[in-house]
Amino acid sequence: MVGQDYNVDRCSGDCNGFLPICLTSCLQTITCISLDCAETKRFAIVPGVVAFNRSTRVWQQTVQIANRSCDRVENLALGLDSLASGWTLTNGNTGAFPNKGFGALDSLGKVTVTLQFDRVGTPALTYNPFVTGTVIAATAKTASAACQAPQLATK
């Protein structure tokens, strides 16, 4: 396998004389190895501060989500696993699997999702956020510029 030694110099040597697609594939393999390309690492999820709007009587939180991969991801939803008892998501899908759908993210794209809640009692808001979606493999046409093969520095 090209790039299997986890070394950019090895990619350059393995792909010498081949099409640029070889180098791109090799470098993406190395990037994937170094980032641990498991689904849990595909997204960066950063929940913001929870605020109460006294006029609307709604609790609100923004969550920033970044797609760390070079693939487009569609049919996205922010899931709230283990949502604290007493809290109900009011602007998404409720029930045993509370979640808020938000469309798609391009490769290396970012989005801010706004969650709204009702609260019964005084428990703190806690949950384990995760993102689900359908991965659309990147092509040379759809990958962002940052996902294209980087220029290798000469020694």
Image: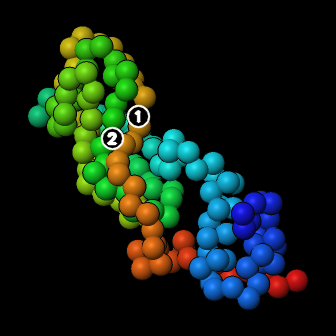
Furthest toward the front, the residue is 1
Residue holding disc 1: 129
- Image location of residue 76, percent across then percent down: 31, 49
- Image location of residue 101, percent across then percent down: 24, 45
- Look at the picture and state if 84 lies above or below 80: above
Q: Residue at x 17, y 37 (%)?
A: 91
Q: Which picture quadrant has residue 87? A: top left
Asked if disc 1 and disc 2 are in contact, CB closer than 8 Å, the reply is yes
Q: Quadrant of the C terminus?
A: bottom right
Q: Quadrant of the N terminus?
A: bottom right
Q: Is residue 134 left or right of residue 33?
A: left
Residue holding disc 2: 78
Mark positioned earlier in the residue sequence (1 or 2): 2
Q: Residue at x 27, y 27 (%)?
A: 97
- Image location of residue 112, percent across then percent down: 33, 52
Q: Amino acid at mark 2?
A: Leu
- Look at the picture and state if 123 lies above or below 144: above
